[in-house]
Amino acid sequence: MLSLLEMSVYGGIFIVAIVILRALAIHHLPKAAFLVLWAAALCRLLLPFDFPSPASIYRTVEPIGDIVRRPGVLQGNTALAAEAPAGILPLSILWFALSVLFAGFFIFSHLRSRREYRASLPLEHPYVKSWLEAHRLRRPVQVRYSDQIETPLTYGILWPVILLPKSLDWSDEVQLSYILAHEMAHIRRFDALSKWLLAAALCIHWFNPLVWVMYVLANRDLELSCDASVVRQHGMQSRAPYALTLVDLEEHRSHFAPLSSSFSKNAMKERITAIMKSRKTSVISISAASVLIVVVVGVFATSAPSLKHKPPVVPYIPAANTANTLEQAQNRVDAADWEQNSTYTQEQYDLLLHNLKFDGYENMSISEFNRKINAAFIQDEDWSKQGINYAYEIVLRDLPDTDPNASFLRNTVQASYREYNTRLNEVRSGMPEDPSFSGAARYVRNEDVFGDTIPVHYVNAEYEFTYRILDQDKLTVAARDQFLQDVMQGAQQVITDRAQEFFTTANAEELFRTALREIGKTASTDHISFTGCKIYYLETD
């Protein structure tokens, strides 16, 4: 299962590819080809499933959500966690609130429009009735008219309605045929449902600007495809009069109705240009469009295939009731605290330790340990809630710094997993790539205010550093972890010792970056070397 962030990022990359293709080939490919691509993008945004393909662009990219990236745990410095600011609104609540707000907007707009549409009357026009008889669908289609609208539109999915303005020139049968053909194309393709799905994607991924771009352009392409259908039905000679019909109706633009298919949507210039440049659809253009769709979907809408033939790990079998041993007591957290403060269970926590904490792991070479860690994660390809991947994802999110295994799970395992995948990417791409590790440092200065201890100044930094393993067979897990600890400890020491300097300087980030480079250089050994760093943010107050 993919996370919301993965769905949004992968979908956003796919949207960029479609937008580029659209800009280059909008007048050269059948308009329906872009509707197929937008439908694939919608699936990528709305379906939390992996679709593996050997052609995927993500074959050389580490999956975004495989492991939650959290700052490492600095041993012997757990007091920092208690000083972190509290009461921050969780991002999930903000996301949900704005999703509901956007959904409410669409529903309210639709219900307001439907209330106006209910005042319409059935149309008893002889030409319209004969036209409908000649273009029957399995679904019953009504044609009504109203003095509440200025341009034709279509609404409804199972019982669709073509709503025409009362002010229309009923004697112009050619214009009527264009209008009815356009609206019937919307009905035939279930465009009302497409608009609901586009709105749903926008409500879910409102934070992604590329989804807003998709919403606008996909709605335009629905209109362009209907225009192409009208021209195809009436012949090439109809292009100019049909374009004039659009221009005439554009002068009477109706109010905004996001979930209806209105005859006069935005981007009229683009529509007129597309109509006048339209050509007969040939076998070559259909074949080219089909190949292009397969390639674009295969490359951008799929994910990298899972690695196969990895050594299995012994399945987790709950041990007998021997919790009185010292080792098990150290590896467990009080069950009551678990239920109150965590989203993961004791069984998931135990599952990780059973499958990842190998006997004598500290003295293993990085080569051996990283292989075993990767094998443990690879065995669980379906991301079931009972599996290692899922358990590690949620445990890492909520694992407190004070947990006796926090350093192992957040430092040792996280670093090894990323080292393996970075090396894999390096081999596949042929380009050098260094693993990275995240850290955080914080300093708070408290003052006494009439007996109360009040924090008056703080320095808060989050950073990432990269390193290169020079000898994977001689570097032990303990030595690698010590290197990580030395860098994090040095970063914390700089923040603490030079806090006053950070408060007063105008270039605190550069100061911290320079210090972090020196710390990394000092921490480097013959087997592991610091290669660079990046400051996510550095705040002072």
Image (cartoon, rainbow, N blue to C red):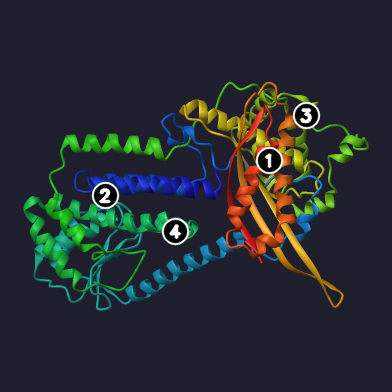
Please identify, in this view, whether the residue under mark 3 or under mark 2 is nearer the observer.
3
Other residues around mark 2 within 10 Å, as few (<14) / some (14–19) / many (≥20): few
Task: Of the two numbered discs 2 and 1 on the same chain, state the one appearing first in sequence.
Answer: 2
The image shows residue 152, relative to residue 190, as above or below, that is below
- Could you say which is closer to the camera, residue 478 or residue 212? 478
| Label 3, label 4: how far apart the Cα atoms are | 48 Å
Q: Label 3: which residue?
A: 362
Please identify, in this view, whether the residue under mark 3 or under mark 4 is nearer the observer.
3
- The single residue placed furthest to the left in the displayed view is 237
Which quarter of the figure is the C terminus placed in? bottom right
Task: Of the two numbered discs 4 and 2 on the same chain, state the one appearing first in sequence.
Answer: 2
Identified by mark 2, the residue type is Ala
Task: Of the two numbered discs 3 and 1 on the same chain, state the one appearing first in sequence.
Answer: 3
| Label 1, label 4: how far apart the Cα atoms are | 30 Å
Task: Of the two numbered discs 3 and 4 on the same chain, state the one appearing first in sequence.
Answer: 4
The image shows residue 530, relative to residue 131, as above or below, that is above
- The single residue placed furthest to the right in the displayed view is 324
SS type, badge 4: helix
Task: Of the two numbered discs 1 and 4 on the same chain, state the one appearing first in sequence.
Answer: 4
Q: Which mark is residue 392?
A: 1
Identified by mark 1, the residue type is Tyr
Q: Label 4: which residue?
A: 202
Q: Label 2: which residue?
A: 23
